Amino acid sequence: MISSHSKLPGIGTNIFSVMSTLAEEHQAINLSQGFPDYACDPKLIELVSDAMKNGDNQYAPMAGLPVLRNLVADKVNHTHQAAYNPDLEVTITAGGTQAIFTALASCINPGDEVIIFEPAYDCYAPTIRMFGGLVKPYSMAFTEDKIDWDMVKKLFSANTKMIIINSPHNPTGCILQEDDIQALIKLTRDTDVLILSDEVYEHLVYDGKQHLSVAAYPELRERAFIIASFGKVLHTTGWKVGYCIAPDFLMKEFRKIHQFNVFSVNTPMQVAIANYLQDETVYSDVTAFFQQKRDYFRSLLAQTRFEMLPCEGSYFQCVTYKAISDEGDYALATRLIKEFGVAAIPLSAFYTRSTDCQVLRFCFAKKQETLENAVNRLIKL
């Protein structure tokens, strides 16, 4: 027998693949994995086709096409009054998850401690561990959307290397407020602690509230990798195109990893996105588009026995089922698929210790009829 030591013992296939596969097996309506079931703008498809026909089919520059990096830098400067050098501080990535992986790979060494806020997107903790880092989780309470920053401070040690924040937050849908940002500034001031700010849902913020990007705060910007995704804005999650912005000294390390990880991102998609985003209303219109979906889905869910939790951003709605069942969340999620034909994500998958809060996550980035059909089934629970 050949002996092999696992880099991630105890880690299996992620929950999104598990639930989507189960949904397909039982022909269930898939509200689990975060992807739209409707088409993107046909104009965007035409732009990709045009790029291919025009010969844009070879390697793009390692850091991304200059025209797209310039567009990103201009957008961030316009939106957050933050000047990033597109040549040195912007890198186009193969989606948000690759950007997160690369940022962690570039700076986490054995023994480094990384603070995360749970429930947390499921790639954070395994990636930290893969590079020998130690995960220091702070558990957020579902009864309130406030972070106790005094408790976060107690997680700090001489080995603290990074804090990962995520706003709008996947899976809870909460967003960071100004007092959170100020607490983070105070906590990291005069330290060498880095920040990874996962902002892939930055344009999906509702009810007139504002997304507070780390880019808008110089004291945070100087120590932060900021991750974003075109897939969420353009309804093209399968294209896997995003970007990372960071100060020059961090981006140098990021690109060292990036060049040996994916090297560069597919060229025709970059060309198409750069052309498509010349129209700035793409960003502004997507907020209203998803707010309408969130509002409609919540109005439908009101007919069920689920209790809805607040959703200030993202395209996920969390619900608690404590008044319905005392089952574990994974057990209920599985039963929903097999007996009722609707797939959701159990939130225990977002905790390092599989904490079960009896909460499920639904994705509402779906056609209206999809949401209606799903809730018609959920009413029977």
Image (cartoon, rainbow, N blue to C red):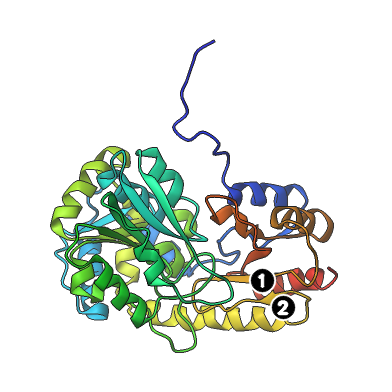
Real-space CA distance between mark 2 and mark 1, rounded to the nearest whole angstrom? 9 Å
Indicate the amino acid at tag 1: Val
Q: Is residue 296 above or below residue 336?
A: below
Asked where in the image residue 305 lies, by quadrant, the reply is bottom right
Indicate the amino acid at tag 2: Leu
Assess whether mark 1 and mark 2 are in contact (beta carbons under 8 angstroms): yes
Q: Which residue is drawn at 41% across and 70% down?
A: 167
Choose mark 2 or mark 1, whichever is in front: 1
Secondary structure state at the residue bearing disc 1? strand
Asked where in the image residue 134 lies, by quadrant, the reply is top left
Q: In which quarter of the image is the N terminus?
A: top right
Q: Is residue 223 above or below residue 312?
A: above
Furthest residue to the top? 1
Q: Where is residue 183 in the image (x, y as percent from the top left)?
A: 31, 75
Q: Name the residue under label 2.
A: 301
Secondary structure state at the residue bearing disc 2? helix
Q: In which quarter of the image is the C terminus?
A: bottom right
Q: Name the residue under label 1.
A: 319
Q: Position of residue 291 (x, y in %)?
A: 53, 82
Residue 110 or residue 265, whichever sits in front: 110
